[in-house]
Amino acid sequence: MSEQKNSKELPACPVETTLTLIGDKWKVLILRDLMPGTKRFGELKKSIGSVSQKVLTAQLRTMEESGLISRKVYAEVPPKVEYSLTALGQSLRPILDSMQNWGEEYKASLR
C-alpha cells in the first residue's frame, strides 16, 4: 500500500486515526510486549495469554501493513519468525506510558 492511499483511507480526525491503528485490545498488548524488544510468535502468544493463534496472526499482519511492526523470517527448518517494532511503532511509547500511568492511578483510586 502506498502512503498516499493510506492517508486517503484514514479518518480525518487524528484521534480516530490513532484508534484505527491501535484501538484493538490485542494490538495494544502486542505493542506493550514488543516495547522491550524483539519476540518470536510463540513468545508473543504466551505473554498475551488468551488470544487465539488465528487472531494474533491477523493482528500482526495488520500492524505490519500499517508500518508499526516488522517481521523477519529466517530461512531455517522449522522456520523462525521474529517481530519487532519499527521506529513508527516505537513512537507510540509515550501513549502506552500514559495509558499505564492512568491505569495505575485509576486502580489506586479504587482502593
Image (spheres, helix red, strand yellow):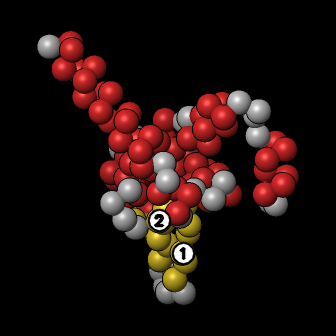
Of the pair 52 and 88, the residue shown nearer to us: 88
Q: Is residue 6 visible?
A: yes
Locate the C terminus and report the quarter of the image it occupies: top left
Vertical comparison of 103 with 75: above or below: above
Using the rendered image of the protein, determine whether residue 57 is visible from the camera's viewpoint.
Answer: no
Residue 64 picture quarter: bottom right
Q: Residue at x 38, y 56 (%)?
A: 35
Graded by Cα atoms within 10 Å as few (under 14), some (14 to 19) or many (20 or more), the crowding at tag 2 reads many
* Comes first in the chain, label 2 or label 1: 1
| Residue that numbered label 2 is attached to | 84
Residue drawn at point x = 25 percent, y = 24 percent: 105
Q: Can you tell which mark lies on residue 72?
A: 1
Seen at 41% across and 45% down, the residue is 94
In x, y percent, where is residue 11? 76, 34
For marks 2 and 1, give the CA distance: 8 Å
User: Which x, y percent locates residue 19?
Assistant: 60, 34
Judged left or right of residue 17, residue 103 is left
Task: Check whether the beta carbons of the residues at disc 2 and disc 1 lie within 8 A of each other.
Answer: yes
Q: Where's the N terminus, which quadrant?
A: bottom right
- The percent position of residue 18, horizontal first and vertical second, equals 60, 38
Q: Judging from the image, what secondary structure is the residue with disc 1 in?
A: strand
Circle 1 crowding by C-alpha within 10 Å: few under 14, some 14–19, many from 20: few
Name the image quarter holding residue 102. Answer: top left
Residue 33, horizontal then vertical, whole percent: 37, 53
Kind of residue indicated by mark 1: Lys
